[in-house]
Image: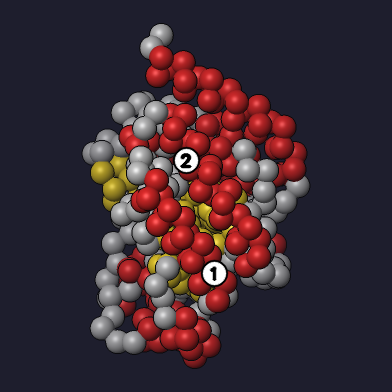
Amino acid sequence: MTDHSQIRRRRFMTLSATGFACSSLMHSFGNTVFAESKSENQPWLRKTLKIGMIRSKGSLTDKFNMAKEAGFEGVELNVPGIDINAANKAAKETGIIIDGTVGGYHWGQRHTDPDPKVREVALEKLKQGLIQTAAVGGKTMLLVPGHGKDGSDAEVMERAQEAIRAALPVAKEQGVSILIENVWNDFCYDHEGGNDQSADRLAAFIDSFNSPLVGVQYDIGNHWKYGDPAQWIRTLNKRIQKLDTKGFSREQGKFTKITEGDINWPSVEKALRDIKFTGWLAAEVGGGDLARLKEVSTHMDESLNCNKSIAGAG
């Protein structure tokens, strides 16, 4: 066994032990820590989308109106750097909910970068993102914590943990959860590995913080390449505070429209119901004009029956 493999195994065992120690604490919290009040007649999955998907040349209010007309209840903005006044004005005028945000910096300035100065910049942007998220009424900020190729497994994990722990006081003060998205970044799985990988390492990473303010924004389509989404959902369980959706074809090795590809959507829906998930489902696919956004909204309904009420989804 190589030294690199030994480090990986030791690190995983440490994280797993931490995870098991605090799993009961994590499971005592609901799927959405700072959830809005829920009505039994409310859809079990509330549709939102990334702001970049809305291809409108008008104002932010125009963009929000387009999203609403297409069938979306929420919009996720990119932080830091948003116009807080404009965002709040657009939300008030349209009734769209800014349910959360996405860290728009996390590829350019990674929290696991070998250069400590880059990590300092990334941490400051994370803190500012949390503050701006709260300022527009958002409850979650999506974060890609880094890249597995930035160092050894131990180094990458330590840097990611250090950044999130440093930001947690701000997250607590602002009432915003930091949600880790599973993306193609060699973090907590092997990008060149098979399609039978488990979610254990990601679950252990989340549990290592022992905080309800750190969870997962689980991307269903991203991990069809690596493992069974339903199995990952059951493993991550209450750690999942939010969902992203897209289509993927293992056979063709590429992303697709949500209802194309070969994801077993009935299996995904059953797993979500088994863990009693209700909350936000964010589209993360190619956007476009109103017709395209309506198509995306329809595909979300067709894949996961979003509009079924909470009472009827149990």
Q: Quadrant of residue 254?
A: top left
Instruction: Using a 10 Å C-alpha cutoff, classify the residue at mark 1 as few (fewer than 14 neighbours), some (14 to 19) or many (20 or more).
Output: many
Measured as percent of width and height from the top left, residue 112 is found at 41, 43
Going by the numbered disc 1, the residue's amino acid type is Ile
Query: Of the numbered discs in the image, which one, if any, rests on residue 159?
Result: 2
**Which residue shows up at 53% across the image and 88% down it?**
92
Q: Is residue 129 left or right of residue 240?
A: left
Q: Earlier in the sequence, mark 1 or mark 2?
A: 1
Going by the numbered disc 2, the residue's amino acid type is Arg
Q: Residue furthest front?
A: 117
Q: Is residue 228 visible?
A: no
Assign a secondary structure to mark 1: helix
Q: Is residue 1 visible?
A: yes
Q: Is 290 rendered above or below residue 238? A: below
Measured as percent of width and height from the top left, residue 170 is found at 60, 62
Considering the image in quadrants, where does the C terminus appear? bottom right
Considering the image in quadrants, where does the N terminus appear? top left
Q: Nearer the viewer, residue 141 or 226?
A: 141
Q: Nearer the viewer, residue 50 or 214?
A: 214
Q: Is 103 rendered above or below residue 233? A: below
Q: Nearer the viewer, residue 44 or 21?
A: 21
Q: Nearer the viewer, residue 67 or 203?
A: 203
Q: Residue furthest left?
A: 252
Query: Of the numbered discs in the image, which one, if any, rests on residue 278?
Result: none
Query: Of the numbered discs in the image, which one, if any, rests on residue 131?
Result: 1
Q: Is residue 299 left or right of residue 89?
A: left
Measured as percent of width and height from the top left, residue 44 is found at 60, 62
Instruction: Using a 10 Å C-alpha cutoff, classify the residue at mark 2 as few (fewer than 14 neighbours), some (14 to 19) or many (20 or more).
Output: many
Q: Is 277 rendered above or below residue 295? A: above
**Which residue shows up at 58% across the image and 22% down it?**
13
Disc 1 versus disc 2: distance between alpha carbons? Answer: 22 Å
